[in-house]
Structures are given as C-alpha cells and as structure tokens.
Image: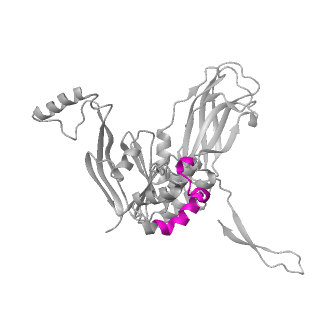
Amino acid sequence: MDTGIVFDHVWKKFRRGEVHDSLRDLIPAAARRLTRRAGPSPDEITGREFWALRDVSFDVRPGEALGIIGANGAGKSTVLKMLNRILRPTRGCIEVRGRAGALIEVSAGFHQDLTGRENLFLQGSIMGMRKDEIARKFDRIVEFAGVGDFIDTPVKRYSSGMNARLGFSIAAHLDPDVLIIDEVLAVGDYSFQDRAFGRIKDMVRSGIPVVIVSHQLDRIASLCTKALVLKQGAVLAEGSPQDCIAEYIHNAAVTPEHDVDTPVLIDSVALVDEHVVRPGEWITLRVAGRVLRPLPPTCEPLAVRVRSVQWGDAIIYELGSRMRDIAGRPVGPWSAEIDLQLNVGPGVYRFDVLAIDRATNAELTTGARTFVRVTEGSQAFDGVVQFNGAMRMLAPVDASVGEGVGVPVGRN
C-alpha cells in the first residue's frame, strides 16, 4: 500500500455557542427530534450552524510536503483534527495511508507528577512506539531535548521551554509513514529552534508525505514542495509555496491606518507594472499622500521599507526622501514615484511606504503597502540578496613573473 494523504471534497460544519444550556432545554429538544417527520439534511446548515470547511481537496504523496497557510479562523486547525481522526467530515472523504506521526501540542499529554523519563515512555507509548523502540531511542531523545540533567525530575519542575523541547524530541523521533506538523517550529530558544527545524527538514527529505500548518512563512517556503491557502474554510489558492505566500499576503493587505497626530498621511501605493518580476529588474511604485500641517525638521515624509516575507519579515532595504535631498513638502496633497532595482533572490517582498520621525525612528503613520513576487532569474542562487557572484581560478604563480594569472571559470 502506498503511503499518502487524500482529502477529497471535504465539508465540515459546527454549531456556534452551546447546544443546550440545561436539562430543561435538552428534554424538549430530544422530544422534537423524535416526533418530527423529517429533519434538515446533514448537508444543510440551520440556525447557529456554520461551515468550518467548504469543499476542500488536496493530496500529498511520498516525497511531497504540503504547507497550509491562512489567517486565524480559516480552517487550518479543523483540517489537522480531521487528519488525526479527532473530527469526522460532514461530507467528503479523508484517507491517511500508513502510520501517522503528529507534531501537535507536543507537551500537552505530559503528566505533571511524573518524571521526564516516565513521561518519555508514557508519551512514546501513546504515540504508538513500542517499549523496546523507546528504550533504543531514549538517549537520542534526551540528548536532542537537552534535559539530560533533569530527566529524573518531575516535569512540573520544568520550565515551559524544557517541556516543549522534551515533547518535540519524543514526537520527532517517531518513524512515521506520514507526518503532520502544527506550529511547532518555534518551540524553545533559538538554538533549539534551529535543531528542530533541521530535524523536520531531514524527515521531509526522507520522502515521507508531510502536511505542515504554520504562520511562519519562511519555514513554509523552505520546507514545502507545494502549498494551500485557506480563507473562511475554502481554498483560496493552491500551487507553489511562493505563489501561495504571495496570494495570502496580497489577500491579507490592510487599509492604511493613521495616527490622529500625524502631520502626513500616506493614502495609497501602487505598482506601476507587473507584480511578478525577475532578479535585477526595475519596478516603480506610485505613491499618493497629504501633508496636513508644516513638517517638523525631524520628519521624513516619505520612506519605503522593503521586507522579505519568507525570511521572517526582515527589513532588507530602506530608502528615505531626506536621503535623496527631496525638499520638505508644503501643506496639501502630493504624489511621488519610487524606482527600485530588485537585486534580490526569488521570493515575496513587501514594500511599506510610510512617514518616519528620524529623531526617534518612530512611524508617524501606518502607511500603505504592496507586494512583489520575484521569480527565478537567469542565474540560480539561494538567499535574500543577489550579488551576481563570479568565480575565477588563478593559475599557479610563475616565479619569473611574480603573480598568478586570472582564468575565468564562469558565473554562478
């Protein structure tokens, strides 16, 4: 039997609030269900019911890693609970072929009065590991979690980070046929996060089917071979991680908000041409705003900050009007164009246009924003910034000449 996941036209409905507040409400409701001739179809919704998932389909085969992204309430947790057989679909079919391993709420099952050692064996057994398998992996699990000095201490004495590290380490040392991951890529401190990410990456590379739900878009971009965007229980987009991240970010764009005391407003920003470009190409941003009153000398009325979405929203570039000797604007409306050459790697980039107080570096207004997706260019490289790197091999030094001769070997 081939391993994998099939999620076929799945619908799931829930009811808002309490179904029955008391026994007084429950008895008449039960009597009505017994006496009425025909109730509503299970595929219909009535009263306080709503669809948490609406006609969602995907499949994950060996060697594939699916990233599921979306805003809070989009239906991601419902999908995970159905994959783990906690919930059943109202309509549709779900099939998980093979032994499933789940990295979800990794320390939730710990008994606080038991030691780390006892919880390791208990949790491992709950996850489907045999006692001899747990014993064989015991030292690796403890070393990975970094709790060796406290393994015989009750976990109620552990910090929250220690609990999370031990729980993750137990779950991450399963040998599942299918792996399901939910927001566990940020457990522990930075050092442990790096190890955890590496462990998950190894599991993904092993070829098992993987489903990952995370708000960490950089992790989705790095780990996944394909992605799915959910919005209000329905599929908004599916395809490559880069395309789906771009669609998710575009859909999540917000209307500018302004501080009542700000001297300048940024009303809009728009990309003049395409939202999809290649490394090294130029883009033009067209900006409109208003100066409400004379600007203080420390105010920079127009600045653009470029952030890499897939690398944790890190600021990779900033340009300000004062840096370019643009005189302070008089009171009233204004417009501007900003030209930028995108010498950056493939990915999704956010362009925030705003006003800044340079004395404090505080944002005077939550400016408008737009997004650009950079695709693969003529040169393949990894990272955030494109340096157009070239390498040259040097011939052996000729003693009579005193220096080597550069021999081009092509560009990377």
Q: Quarter of the image holding residue 393?
A: bottom right
Residue 342, how many percent across, how many down? 63, 49
Residue 307, how many percent across, how many down? 61, 44
In the shown orientation, is residue 302 left or right of residue 233?
right
At x 9%, y 34%, the residue is: 37
Q: Which portion, as a residue range, is magenta? A: 134-157
What main secondary structure does the magenta stretch of the protein show?
helix
Q: Name the foreground residue: 371 vs 356.
A: 356
Q: Quarter of the image holding residue 140?
A: bottom right
Residue 23, how many percent across, how many down? 24, 29
Residue 258, how many percent across, how many down? 59, 25
In the shown orientation, is residue 409 left or right of residue 116?
right
Which quarter of the rendered picture does the C terminus lie within?
A: bottom right
Q: Quarter of the image holding residue 25?
A: top left
Q: Is residue 176 magenta?
A: no
Q: Name the foreground residue: 6 vs 111.
A: 111
Which quarter of the rendered picture does the N terminus lie within?
A: bottom left
Q: Identify whether 406 is placed above or below 346.
A: below
Q: Is residue 142 magenta?
A: yes
Residue 299 in view of the camera:
yes
Total numbered labels placed on residues in the image: 0
Residue 333 in view of the camera:
no
